[in-house]
């Protein structure tokens, strides 16, 4: 009606000009203006824009911008399905979005889900259930993604990966290497044994067929030349290569071949030794033992050499996973009593039994060997801030799992981060190592690593600010895993169920 009146007004009204820029409406026009006003009065007032529908709203949170190392107060986050659809000032997001479920953060701190980039599942077929029971523990401790660096249950882990992705198994997102590439008759079980380039080609083809997320290459019995060949073939297949660099090779040779990540800080340490190439050559030729090679490495570290090498790692985008927690735990088994650790209640009897070989070895050590372990740990840990200063991306990983005594799944990541800060990183750098470095290594920063619209709804709500105290990562109030809420009560139930399982297994084992 209003449009028709305006149309008639344009055709019929004839204003009377009074002065330049002004007009006086005649009687006909006045009538139409009255009618127009009346019609407008009966038009419905436009309602405020309807709010968009989400599944979950998190209100009044302090969002931790990990990349910017800053807290952003009074934020709201809208989640639909497994994705974040909006983040912003609380009032604005609440006006724009509605959801049937709401979390009142009350000023708690919201971070991206934590990633453990180096774990192992294993101990043999008899321990499959004990390993699988560890999966909910990761979620209970705020760890939403783990990178399995393979043990002796690679096929089972790949099966769990599919089940978790399908929603039929509860646990963190699993990214797995599948079976490791190794030499003939290696120390570690569950590997693809290779003694020739043809063997390596077949192993890489098998891993591609399994759809692994990356490839792990270790140095138990693998020939140094085949190690480099395997790295090159893995990269040619479009996969990332991770591994232990053989003593007979330099770090630079592995980098030139295309290694994507160096596992364990002790391997990165080698790159800072001025005489690294000569030591590697002497070991390869059989002129020195491994112990003698290690002694020369320990004695010949040079900071200038190290910084130059680490800048090369940065430029070549080679990441380092320090696994400091296991290094420290094993170095100090002589003085630290773990027999009363509360977390043992979550570790099955079969897995606990695998710890014994390291415990026995530590008990046999001479005072000189104990002091050497302490010294090597301190020397290795001192490399960490050098890597950070050089700009190398540090990935948080624990080496937790079977065999590695008292390096606990889930809890170990928080202890790892505390060691990073103890050894020279800022809390922000440590937090980035556990939230952004993993996604960056996998090329998934477009989906993970920050609390932003479009990102995966893997989030952890903390009681305290991790930028002020890295121990705050343990103050988990709520976990959002792929959009599904696990509040404190649900997390406590996960822990209670894990304790009950272990108690039952202990009873069955007569412990």
Image: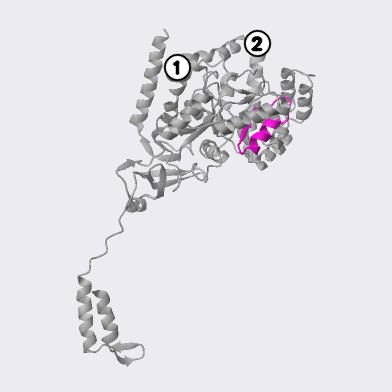
* x and y percentages locating residue 329 in the rendered image: 56, 21
Is residue 106 magenta-colored? no
* x and y percentages locating residue 258 in the rendered image: 67, 37
The stretch in magenta equals 228-250
Q: Could you tell whether 302 is left or right of 204 in the image? A: right
Q: Could you tell whether 267 is left or right of 440 in the image? A: right
- The dot on residue 165 is none
Q: In the picture shown, does residue 52 fall above or below 277?
A: below
Q: Secondary structure at mark 1?
A: loop
> Is residue 506 visible to us here?
yes
- The dot on residue 348 is 1
Q: Secondary structure at mark 2?
A: loop
The residue indicated by pointer 2 is: 366
Q: In the picture shown, does residue 54 fall above or below 487?
A: below
* x and y percentages locating residue 486 in the rendered image: 36, 33
Is residue 238 magenta-colored? yes
Mark 1: few/some/many CA within 10 Å (<14, 14-19, 20+): many
């Amino acid at each position: 009606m209003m449009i028709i009146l305006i149309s008639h007004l344009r055709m019929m009204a004839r204003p009377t000009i009074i002065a330049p820029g002004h007009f006086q409406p005649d009687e006909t026009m006045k009538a139409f203006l009255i009618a127009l006003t009346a019609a407008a009065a009966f038009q419905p007032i436009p309602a405020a824009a309807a709010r968009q529908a989400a599944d979950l709203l998190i209100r009044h949170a302090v969002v931790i911008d990990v990349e910017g190392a800053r807290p952003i107060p009074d934020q709201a986050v809208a989640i639909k399905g497994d994705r974040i659809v909006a983040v912003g000032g609380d009032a604005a997001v609440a006006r724009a979005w509605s959801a049937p479920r709401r979390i009142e953060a009350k000023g708690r701190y919201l971070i991206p889900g934590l990633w453990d980039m180096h774990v192992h599942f294993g101990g043999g077929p008899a321990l499959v259930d004990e390993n699988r029971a560890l999966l909910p523990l990761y979620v209970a401790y705020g760890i939403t993604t783990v990178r399995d660096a393979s043990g002796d249950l690679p096929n089972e882990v790949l099966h769990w990966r599919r089940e978790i992705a399908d929603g039929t198994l509860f646990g963190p997102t699993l990214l797995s290497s599948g079976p490791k590439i190794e030499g003939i008759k290696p120390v570690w079980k569950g590997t693809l044994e290779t003694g020739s380039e043809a063997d390596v080609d077949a192993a890489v083809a098998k891993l591609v067929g399994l759809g692994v997320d990356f490839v792990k290459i270790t140095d138990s019995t693998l020939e140094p030349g085949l190690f480099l060949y395997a790295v090159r073939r893995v990269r040619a297949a479009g996969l990332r290569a991770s591994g232990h660099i053989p003593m007979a090779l330099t770090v630079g040779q592995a980098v030139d071949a295309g290694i994507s990540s160096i596992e364990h800080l002790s391997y990165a340490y080698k790159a800072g030794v001025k005489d690294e190439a000569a030591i590697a050559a002497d070991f390869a030729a059989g002129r020195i033992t491994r112990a003698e090679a290690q002694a020369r490495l320990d004695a010949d570290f040079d900071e200038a050499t190290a910084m130059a090498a680490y800048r090369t790692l940065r430029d070549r985008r080679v990441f380092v996973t320090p696994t400091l927690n296991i290094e420290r735990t094993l170095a100090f088994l002589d003085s630290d009593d773990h027999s009363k650790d509360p977390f043992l209640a979550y570790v099955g009897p079969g897995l606990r039994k695998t710890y014994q070989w390291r415990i026995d070895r530590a008990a046999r050590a001479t005072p000189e060997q104990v002091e050497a372990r302490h010294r090597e740990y301190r020397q290795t840990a001192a490399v960490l801030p050098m890597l950070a200063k050089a700009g190398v991306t540090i990935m948080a990983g624990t080496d937790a799992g079977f065999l590695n005594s008292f390096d606990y799944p889930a809890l170990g990541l928080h202890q790892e981060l505390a060691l990073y800060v103890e050894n020279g990183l800022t809390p922000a750098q440590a937090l980035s190592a556990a939230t952004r470095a993993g996604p960056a290594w996998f090329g998934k920063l477009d989906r993970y690593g920050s609390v932003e619209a479009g990102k995966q709804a893997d989030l952890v709500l903390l009681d305290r600010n991790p930028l002020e105290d890295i121990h705050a990562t343990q103050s988990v109030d709520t976990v959002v895993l792929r959009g599904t809420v696990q509040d404190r009560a649900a997390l406590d139930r996960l822990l209670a169920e894990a304790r009950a399982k272990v108690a039952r297994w202990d009873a069955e084992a007569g412990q």
